[in-house]
Image: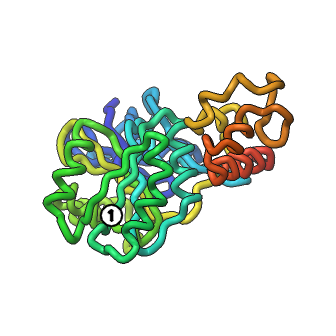
Amino acid sequence: MLSGTVIAAHGRHYLVQTDTAKLQCVTRGKKSDVAVGDIVNIKLTSPDQGVIESFQERTTLLYRSDQYKSKILAANLTQLFIVVATEPGFSDDLVSRSLVAAEAAGIRAHIILNKIDVTASLERTRERLGLYAGLGYPVHQVSAKGNPDGTRATLGPLLGGQSSILIGQSGMGKSSLINLLVPDADIATREISAALDTGKHTTTFTRLYRPSPDTAIIDSPGFQEFGLYHLSEGMLERAFPEFAPHLGHCKFYNCHHLNEPSCAVLSAVEDGAIAPMRHDLYRQLVHEASQTLY
């Protein structure tokens, strides 16, 4: 039995990096609950192929879900980086949902503002990100194409020794950042694509790169929505850090913080201590959680 790290997944086919080789692996039966970043135990079936028998206990698990199913993004992460840009415009809803997912999973969250050389909308973008900075989420301002050396100097120390995932909408420059931070990322992606027989669909799967032995950088496909139907109401209220000072101070011990009288959270919204946009998201997420069918 060998052990290794899952570095890419496509359907029920996985690429696993061991100490000495990359192995093409499948799971037994129809189980497909293995994630990129998982440390797995493999039984060899040929010199370069194997069957995943089990995976080792995870420290963290990041996933998104809709009303019908959930999709694992990655396992054993320590950090999540949300990539946004001055142009094209980014979605506050996606950023906020990603932050909630990170909080619920126990993963540190950062925001990368890319393309700061595009100055026309820079100040407005900075203002929008000020809300998240005020909640304690670091915002790192870079320009992958305009100042690649400065970008490496800013992000390199943050990534070293960590297991990080970069997520974001299409067009934010995530691929440019990956190519800057991971030497030969394009070559590695082509190798992974060939091994998984994904052909031209190189952007449709999550993949893990190791720029150094103790550093993992995971690239994920761009997506426009981040469903969180799997989070319970209790998990949601704790995933909004600005709610924390007010929890336990409502009139009713089982307060939902939606329309109850003498709710400390609603009072904080009225007083400006909690942004209305953030509470609106909480309200939407609680509604979504009540619709889950799986």
Residue 176 position by quadrant: bottom left
| Residue position for label 1 | 114
Q: Could you tell me if residue 216 is visible in this image?
A: yes
Name the residue at the left extreme. 149
Q: Secondary structure at mark 1?
A: strand
Q: Residue at x 48, y 60 (%)?
A: 128
Q: Residue at x 58, y 61 (%)?
A: 225
In terms of depth relative to the viewer, which is nearer, 192 or 169? 169
Rendered position, 245 above or below 72: above
- x, y percent for residue 211: 19, 48
State how many labels appear. 1
Residue 148 position by quadrant: bottom left
Name the residue at the bottom extreme. 120
Q: Is 171 situated left or right of 269 in this image?
A: left
Rendered position, 136 above or below 154: above
Rendered position, 248 above or below 8: above
Q: Residue at x 37, y 45 (%)?
A: 138
In terms of depth relative to the viewer, which is nearer, 215 or 177? 177
Specify the amino acid type for callout 1: Asn
- x, y percent for residue 152: 18, 55
Q: Quadrant of the N terminus?
A: top left
In terms of depth relative to the viewer, which is nearer, 96 or 227? 96
Q: Is 215 situated left or right of 273 in this image?
A: left
Mark 1: give few (<14), some (14-19) or many (20+) Cα within 10 Å: many
Q: Is 220 situated left or right of 11 in this image?
A: left
Q: Residue at x 47, y 65 (%)?
A: 169
- x, y percent for residue 4: 32, 37
